[in-house]
Amino acid sequence: QVQLVESGGGLVQPGGSLRLSCAASGFYFSSYAMSWFRQAPGKARELVAAMTRASTNYADSVKGRFTISGDNAKNTVYLQMNSLKPEDTAVYYCNAGLRTATGKEYSYWGQGTQVTVSS
């Protein structure tokens, strides 16, 4: 059974930091691209950061402030968020994605964790 369980969200003041965690199980973690998305009220879900074996990518809005990393031994991906701004307020979702050589696609989502940046 595939599971992605996010944790680490909460309320933080502007300029503060949070570290989100996403614990994965039920699939071969190191084969998948791992990503963090977020969705603010009334807005579409957007990609925040993504990580493969070869590279990491970030949305322009978070470059230099957020860092995605992974621990294959723990089947966990992290999102370190520094210098948080009110516009970072959203529900953050973990995603695991894989496209096989035959073109079959797999995509799994966590339940989301709320991040609120406010004074």
Image (spheres, grey):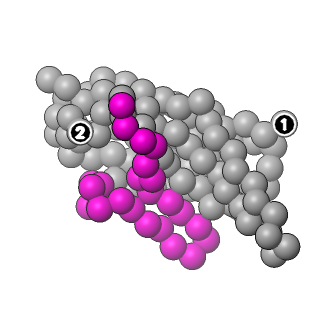
Residue 115 can be seen, yes or no:
no
52 displayed left or right of 65: right
Say which amino acid is labelled 2: Glu
Image quadrant in which the N terminus is located: top right
Front disc: 2 or 1: 2
> Image point 29% across, 62% down: which residue?
60
> Image point 63% across, 61% down: which residue?
33
Report x, y in % for residue 64. 26, 61
- Per the picture, the main secondary structure of the magenta-coloured stretch is loop
95 or 65, nearer to the observer: 95
Label 2, label 1: how far apart the Cα atoms are: 35 Å
Report x, y in % for residue 13. 19, 29
N-terminal of the pair, mark 2 or mark 1, is 1
Residue 55 can be seen, yes or no:
yes
Q: Which residues are magenta?
A: 42-65
Residue at the disc numbered 2: 87
Residue at the disc numbered 1: 1
90 displayed left or right of 21: left
Residue 58 in magenta?
yes
> Image point 48% across, 29% down: which residue?
113
Quadrant for residue 34, please give it: bottom right
Image quadrant in which the C terminus is located: top left
Quadrant for residue 111, please give it: top right
